[in-house]
Each structure stands twice: as structure tokens, then as C-alpha cells.
């Protein structure tokens, strides 16, 4: 059984997973910068106590770049600064008696969805998470892209969409994330309000246009068979998925085969499922068929 912890933009999500079965799950809402490791540890111990079983492996996901050699988070664009360059694997060993496998959250989500989620067995895939930011990950020939320093595939939200756009906290100008994420919303306006009412139709159209441009660039870059659209805003269903897919089909390189688009039925568990796969594996993950339940 794997203990999986996902440090998300607004919540810390924890889950115990046995194979592809979710034994238990818990969420902790965080406010501003109030989250710390003690909060995660306390909730994890409660989860284990309630399950009456010890963890056999630990996986941790962070919303930033993870060094592929040290497993430490290098940078997270102003999120979870207390985790920067912190040895989470050693912390896990002290806290739970097991070293942790540490991975970028979007990459873990992609592994989860191609292992036992919405796209099982797919070897060429792109995942895009929309919400607090724009998280991305890519897989080619069954191998999640990590690159020389861990940055490959996960910075799709920082592709330049508008050369005259705003400065992004990452230092780039006109990033998709700077133009179409919760940080781009006017004060007192929520993403739910934008996509479930007609009060901000122009803003909704702008966000969908930016997301469509980002996904088109990712498809051009990685040639996936499937694009997995995730994140809380996808609860709006076709109101989000359909315009993005239409944009990609309209702007796709003429000789490319359009990918299929899927939305995970349980996006809140995508990261945990991927961490479970990584935590119980001692080798580099490659795509596998869906496990029997």
C-alpha cells in the first residue's frame, strides 16, 4: 500500500492506494502560505491509523520542478517556498520510516491517467491541468519526459501566448498561465463564476482562446495520441473541453492526426495514482496496460 501526498495549489491531497484501488483519501484546505510539512504529516498519520495498515511505499508530488537526480524541488514559481531544495525523501524516512519518491504533480498525474485512469496503456500523451495555474506533462513512446534537469514537458503553461502580455512571476512575458489562470482573474471573481454563469462571457472566451493556443502548441511539440484535460474547472465538462478541442483542430498542422481528448472522471486522484505507480517501482516508469481491479 502506497501513501501518496499531493501538495496542490489550494489543497494538500492525501491517499492510500493499494494497486489501483483507493483505500482512503483525505484533503486539507490551505490558506495562503499556511501549509507546512507538519500539516501533511499529521493528516498522513491519521489516514494510516484509520486504515490500520502501514504504508509500504511513499510518493510525494510538488507543484514545481524536481531535480531528476536529487529528488529535490528546484523551483515552484512562488508556491511552497519552504519545500525548495528540501530533502523530502529524507523527511519521509524520518516521519514514516520509508524514503519517498518525489515527482512534479502534473507528471505524476499523467502517469496516473495512463496507468489506471482515463487513458490506460497510452504511450504518447499530453496532460494539461487548468485552474490555479496551467500544469502540463508529456509522454513519448511510453516514457514521461523529464529532460536533463527535470524541466521537460512541464512548462507548457509558460509558453508565450502574447508578446505584449503581462509579466509572469516566472520572469517570462505573456505566458498562458499569466493570461488564463486564477491569478489572471479580476478581484472577487472566481473561476466557477466565469464558467457557470454569463456574467463574464468575454473573460471566459479569452481564457478558452488562451488554453486552446497552449494546447495546440503542446500538440505540435509532442504529437500525442491523446490529450488529457484535467483540473477542477473541467467539472464544467464540454463547456471547457469542446472549445479547446475545436481550437486545436482548427489550428493544427495540416498533416498531423488530431489527438483524442479525454477528461478524467476523478481528476482529484490523478496525481495519487501516478505517485502510487512511481513509489512501488524501482525503475523509470513506462506506460503499462490498465491493471486489473
Image (spheres, rainbow, N blue to C red):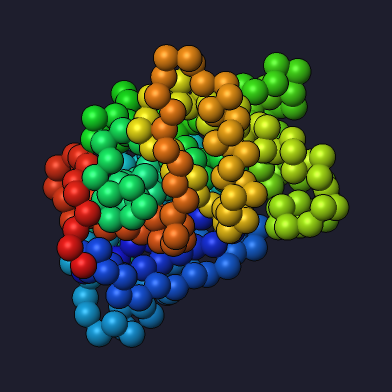
Judge whether 215 appears above or below 202 on screen: above
Quarter containing the C terminus: bottom left
The residue under the point 31% across, 33% down is 124
**In the image as oriented, which residue stretches furthest toward the left?**
282
Query: Residue 208, located in which quarter of the rendered image?
Result: top right
Camera-side residue of 90 and 184: 184
Residue 245 x %, y %: 55, 36
Judge whether 85 appears above or below 29 on screen: above
Residue 57 x %, y %: 21, 62
Residue 182 x %, y %: 69, 47
Query: Residue 205, located in which quarter of the rendered image?
Result: top right
The residue under the point 41% across, 32% down is 259
Residue 201 is at least partly visible in this image: yes
Quarter containing the N terminus: bottom left
Residue 224 x %, y %: 37, 30
The residue under the point 64% across, 49% down is 239
Amino acid at each position: 500500500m502506497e501513501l501518496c501526498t499531493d501538495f496542490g495549489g489550494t489543497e494538500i491531497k492525501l491517499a492510500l492506494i493499494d494497486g489501483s484501488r483507493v483505500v482512503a483519501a483525505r484533503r486539507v484546505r490551505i490558506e495562503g502560505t499556511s501549509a507546512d510539512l507538519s500539516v501533511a504529516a499529521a493528516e498522513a498519520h491519521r489516514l494510516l491509523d484509520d486504515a490500520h495498515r502501514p504504508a509500504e511505499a511513499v510518493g510525494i508530488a510538488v507543484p514545481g520542478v524536481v531535480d531528476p537526480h536529487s529528488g529535490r524541488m528546484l523551483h515552484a514559481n512562488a508556491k511552497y517556498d519552504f519545500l525548495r531544495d528540501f530533502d523530502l525523501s529524507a523527511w519521509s524516512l524520518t516521519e514514516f520510516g520509508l524514503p519517498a519518491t518525489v515527482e512534479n504533480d502534473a507528471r505524476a498525474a499523467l502517469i496516473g491517467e495512463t496507468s489506471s485512469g482515463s487513458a490506460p496503456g497510452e504511450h504518447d500523451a499530453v496532460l494539461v491541468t487548468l485552474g490555479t495555474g496551467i500544469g502540463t506533462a508529456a509522454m513519448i513512446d511510453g516514457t514521461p519526459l523529464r529532460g536533463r534537469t527535470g524541466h521537460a514537458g512541464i512548462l507548457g503553461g509558460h509558453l508565450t501566448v502574447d508578446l505584449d502580455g503581462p509579466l509572469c512571476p516566472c520572469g517570462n512575458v505573456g505566458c498562458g498561465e499569466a493570461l488564463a489562470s486564477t491569478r489572471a482573474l479580476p478581484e472577487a471573481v472566481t473561476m466557477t463564476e466565469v464558467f457557470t454563469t454569463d456574467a463574464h462571457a468575454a473573460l471566459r472566451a479569452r481564457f478558452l482562446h488562451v488554453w486552446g493556443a497552449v494546447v495546440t502548441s503542446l500538440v505540435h511539440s509532442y504529437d500525442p495520441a491523446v490529450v488529457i484535460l484535467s483540473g477542477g474547472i473541467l467539472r464544467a465538462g464540454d463547456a471547457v473541453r469542446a472549445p479547446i478541442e475545436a481550437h486545436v483542430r482548427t489550428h493544427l498542422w495540416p498533416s498531423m492526426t488530431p489527438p483524442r481528448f479525454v477528461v478524467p472522471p476523478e481528476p482529484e486522484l490523478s496525481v495519487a495514482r501516478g505517485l502510487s505507480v512511481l513509489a512501488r517501482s524501482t525503475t523509470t516508469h513506462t506506460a503499462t496496460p490498465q491493471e486489473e481491479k
